Amino acid sequence: MKLKTKEVKDITVIELDGNVIGGPDVTVLNDYLHELIADNKKNVVVDLKMVSFINSSGLGMLIGGLTTMRNSGGDLKLARASKKIEHLLEVTKLLKVFDLHKNVNDAIASF
């Protein structure tokens, strides 16, 4: 998994690319989120457009990221999930946990 970021207004957009399967990627994302919090950047959109596969460890990584941001007084929202990933979020009841948007601009506007 690759991670690319950009700032839009006061929101950090994290573009994930590749399979989200946990492992070392968990540490990379978690460390980055803590850096954002240290810089007082607490609202994040995770762009899933380039993600083709997420396993249970990857879902755990996203839940951990959501918890980290919410515990700091911010939030983490998802955008542009494929139909396959959206279905996975629905089956696992995580659509009730995550705020999922069709595009990044809608996710940013929802803050």
Image: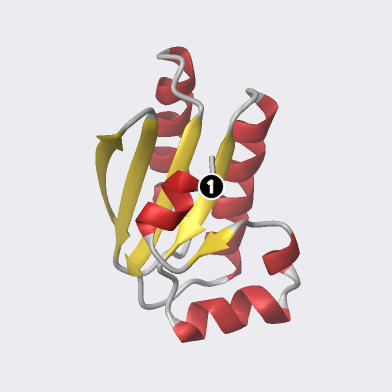
The N terminus - image quarter? bottom left
Figure colour scheme: secondary structure
Residue drawn at point x = 46 percent, y = 32 percent: 33
Mark 1 lies on residue: 110
| 82 vs 41: above or below | below
Q: Position of residue 107 (x, y in %)?
A: 47, 52
Horizontally, residue 70 falls left or right of residue 110, namely right
Q: Position of residue 8 (x, y in %)?
A: 29, 37
| 74 vs 23: above or below | above
Q: Position of residue 100 (x, y in %)?
A: 56, 62
Horizontally, residue 88 falls left or right of residue 47, namely right
Residue drawn at point x = 63 percent, y = 23 percent: 72
> Which of the two residues, 100 or 55, is positioned nearer the viewer here?
100
Residue drawn at point x = 64 percent, y = 57 percent: 98
**Residue 11's quadrant in the figure?**
top left
| 55 vs 105: above or below | below
Could you tell me how many numbered marks the image carries?
1
Horizontally, residue 8 falls left or right of residue 61, namely left
| 87 vs 94: above or below | below
> Which of the two residues, 48 or 9, is positioned nearer the viewer here?
9
Q: Amino acid at mark 1?
A: Ser
**Residue 80's quadrant in the figure?**
bottom left
Helix, strand or loop at label 1? It is loop
Residue drawn at point x = 54 percent, y = 39 percent: 111
Horizontally, residue 34 falls left or right of residue 5, namely right
Neighbour tally class for label 1: few under 14, some 14-19, many 20 plus, Cα within 10 Å: few
Q: Position of residue 15 (x, y in %)?
A: 30, 53
